[in-house]
């Protein structure tokens, strides 16, 4: 026999939000991602980011400057959110880096720059060689 369960609209909204949050958390990984031929992954225990492409491998310290925080970030996980990258730090905070900024960082990496930086709408991400 089938059982019918009745739920309110607010219950449905809560369920959908929970599913979306769990899905976005599941997409984040400590293994890293590949973007435009470059593998970007967190370095365990340091919070740095490792960029790899062919024979080139570089480790970068991460700093951000936003309206709410400015300083070093210890990256624990990365994930894809459409064409953007989501970064999670060691405190559980998450922030997105837009596609155009990622491509800009990768271009600078491929040009062998010691400092990679990108800015967008009040957020600046700066990567310095570790």
Image (cartoon, rainbow, N blue to C red):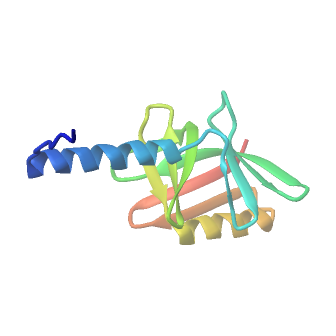
Coordinates of residue 106 in the picture (x, y in percent)? 69, 65
Query: Which residue appears at 11% of the width and 45% of the height?
Result: 7
Residue farthest to the top, as pictured: 45
The answer to which image quadrant residue 44 occupies is top right
Query: Which residue appears at 50% of the width and 32% of the height?
Result: 90
Coordinates of residue 81 in the picture (x, y in percent)? 49, 59
Q: Say which quadrant the C terminus sits in.
A: top right
Q: Is residue 90 above or below residue 110?
A: above
Q: Is residue 11 above or below residue 54?
A: above
Coordinates of residue 129 in the picture (x, y in percent)? 73, 47
Coordinates of residue 13 in the picture (x, y in percent)? 18, 50
**Residue 48 showing in the rendered view:** yes
Residue farthest to the front, as pictured: 1
Q: Say which quadrant the N terminus sits in.
A: top left
Query: Which residue appears at 68% of the width and 49% of the height?
Result: 128
Query: Which residue appears at 35% of the width and 50% of the height?
Result: 20
């Amino acid at each position: 026999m089938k059982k019918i369960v009745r739920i309110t609209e607010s219950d449905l909204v809560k369920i959908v939000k929970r599913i979306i949050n769990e899905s976005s958390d599941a997409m984040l990984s400590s293994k890293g991602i590949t973007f435009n031929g470059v593998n970007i992954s967190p370095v365990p225990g340091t919070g740095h980011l490792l960029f790899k492409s062919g024979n080139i491998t570089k480790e970068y310290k991460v700093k951000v400057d936003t309206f709410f925080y400015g300083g070093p970030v210890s990256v624990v996980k990365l994930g894809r959110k459409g064409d953007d990258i989501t970064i999670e730090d060691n405190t559980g905070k998450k922030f997105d880096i837009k596609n155009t900024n990622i491509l800009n960082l990768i271009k600078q990496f491929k040009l062998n720059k010691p400092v990679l930086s990108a800015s967008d709408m009040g957020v600046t991400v700066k990567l310095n060689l570790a």
